[in-house]
Amino acid sequence: MVTDPYRDHCKRQHRILAHHLCLEAWRAGDDGILLERHHLEEFLKIERFKSSRVQWLLEDLEPWFKYIYPVYSESALESLQALYLSRVPIDEKFIIKNDDVSVEDLVGWMRNNGVRISLLYSISTLVPLTEEQIVPRLALLATGLAEP
């Protein structure tokens, strides 16, 4: 079986991201994270999200976050705007696609209604996200040389 080196690279990137996000949510006492498009763009170093790349991303994040809800722009149905990543289901009434609501207000409303979710920048010490920052941190945690 021949593997696509680009797919392998993407899978590795996605797994690093998933592991980091899972640890950040766990440290904050949350079940999930609302990940905005610009965080994905920064980490993955891409500006366009083709449907195959989004599908790979969703597949690769699933072992860490069983419930993934992609949010697409109302004006461009193919344009990924955000990802809700959670280990527990989120009621559809919280998955808002309205551009008039700020993400801060949205997350506040969700938290006030019992959904334990945060925005990445409110819980992570590594913003903007880069592999160069995440990989050494994960290695230190895995070897017991650092604490979460």
Image (spheres, grey):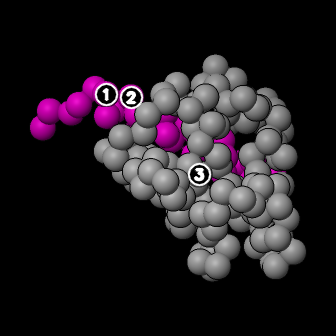
Report which residue position mark 1 lands on: 6
Nearer to me, 42 or 71:
71
Give the CA distance from mark 1 to mark 2: 5 Å
Helix, strand or loop under label 2 = helix
Q: Is 142 situated left or right of 30 in this image? A: left
Whether residue 9 appears in magenta in the rendering, the answer is yes
Please state which amino acid type lies under the numbered disc 2: His
| Residue 40 in which image quadrant | top right
On screen, residue 129 above or below 78: above
Residue range of the region highlighted in magenta in the rendering? 1-27
- Nearer the viewer's eye, disc 2 or disc 3? 3
Give the CA distance from mark 2 to mark 3: 22 Å
| Residue 144 in which image quadrant | top right
At horizontal 75% and vertical 55% (from top left) the residue drawn is: 103
Give the CA distance from mark 3 to mark 1: 23 Å
Say whether residue 58 is visible. no
Please state which amino acid type lies under the numbered disc 1: Tyr
Report which residue position mark 2 lands on: 9
Q: Looking at the image, do the residues carrying marks 2 and 3 touch, with CB atoms under 8 Å apart?
A: no
Nearer to me, 109 or 136:
109
Please state which amino acid type lies under the numbered disc 3: Ala
On screen, residue 11 above or below 113: above
Residue that protrudes farthest toward the left in the picture: 1
On screen, residue 103 above or below 134: below
Q: Main secondary structure of the magenta part?
A: helix
Residue 110 is tagged as: none
Q: Is 32 situated left or right of 64 in this image? A: right
Report which residue position mark 3 lands on: 82
Q: Looking at the image, do the residues carrying marks 1 and 2 touch, with CB atoms under 8 Å apart?
A: yes
Q: Quadrant of the C terminus?
A: top right
